[in-house]
Image: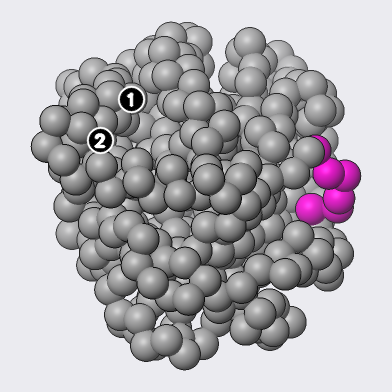
Amino acid sequence: MGDAKILISGASVAGPALAFWLNRHGFDVTVVERAPSLRPGGQAVDLRGTAKEVARRMGLDERIRAACTDSKGETLVDRNNRTKATLRADDLGGDGLIAEIEILRGDLSEVLYEATREKTEYVFGDRITALDDGADGVDVTFDSGSRRTFDLVIGADGLHSGVRALAFGEESRFVRHLGAYLTFFTVPNHLGLQDWALGYNDVGRSAGIRGIHDGKEAMAYFGFAADDIEYDYRDVEAQKAMVRRFASGMEWEVPWLLEQLDDAPDFYFDSCAQVVMDSWSRGRIGLLGDSAFCPSPLSGQGTSLAFVGAYVLAGELAADFDNGLERYEAVMRDFVEKTQAMGRANAKTVFAKSRWAVRAQHLALRAMHLKPIAALVSRKMQDVVSGIDLPDYTTTPHRI
């Protein structure tokens, strides 16, 4: 079945990562993406633990590192810019709160696209509108009006997955809100930040700035705690108004950052949520990455899960195409659940509930530099980020 035709929805990270491994195993791959082209910028994402080994097996480790933000750490400051705690990328073996492999989502997408475009059909500016899983394959209808049949369809189209909605039901059945929201957008680097980030914690909210692209620009972020808010995730202007409302009254650099919102070329906003499903497949339709098992940005593991999941899914399909979706889930399920548990735990503490709690956060982060505490935290972190034994698929029968 090495020449089976597989359709992937989503060209961000999980989709192209899966295309990479499917190409290596000899499958015929098409990726459809509703955006007209690759989306630039976006939030900084990380590769930790086992995901770094997947990147090495891809042969893309050097290219990914070359495109990294090169953030060597972050200083947490108060409203007067006084240092309260410092985090370094080499803390906890490079898998700490600031990861040694930190890269803008758009830059990682570009690396994966360049590594796959010669052997993958990419269709931009279109999306799947109907799926019919029949006896001879999955009949797919696209928004453009075209129709095609594939042996397998994989939704790698994120938290608000269209494939998941078509095949499994409405989003509300699977998305669990964690009580927090995040936004990221590019701004001028008026602080002259190079390989460092600054962060400011307030009660129930936070903000930060990091230099990107060799200091030519900066990436800003806001985060805030809030109950589940109804909003249209495609209405950018309404989202910006929401950010202004929740950040109102914050000090430090926040007033200047809010002034930059209207000119931001790559504004991103979404809830911190998890996707929880009993199964990630139905017939010849499967899910990967945030579509299937989003752990939320508060876990720091969403991109790592996508990388590992892409490797496992492609390998299991190459080893046993008919049962590959079930085998992939059996391999990944425990790793996903441990990661999601960490995300839920982080959601309870990431936004301080009082001024005292802000001070306690700073004290806890400073204490992490003490060797006994650092060793304990490192062990707990590795139990999650390296919590899966990668199978070896190099001898699967369809590998080319």
Residue 397, visible in the rendered structure: no
User: In this figure, which residue is indicated by the disc labeled 2?
Assistant: 49
From the viewer's perspective, is the residue at label 1 or at label 2 nearer? Answer: 1
Q: Is the magenta stretch mostly helix, strand or loop?
A: loop
Label 1 close to label 2 by CB (< 8 Å):
yes
Q: Position of residue 132 (x, y in %)?
A: 78, 25
Q: Tell me the quadrant of the picture where the C terminus can be found.
A: top left
Residue that appears at 52% across and 58% down: 201
Visible residue check, residue 371: yes
Q: Kindly identify the amino acid type of the residue bearing the numbered disc 2.
A: Gly
Q: Does the magenta stretch include residue 361?
A: no
Report the span colored magenta: 228-233
Give the residue type that dot 1 points to: Val
Q: Please rate how many residues cluster around mark 1, counting C-alpha atoms within 10 Å: few if below 14, some from 14 to 19, many from 20.
A: many
Label 2 secondary element = loop
**Relative depth, front residue between 174 and 262:** 262
Sequence order check, earlier mark of 1 and 2:
2
- Is 82 in front, or is 335? 82
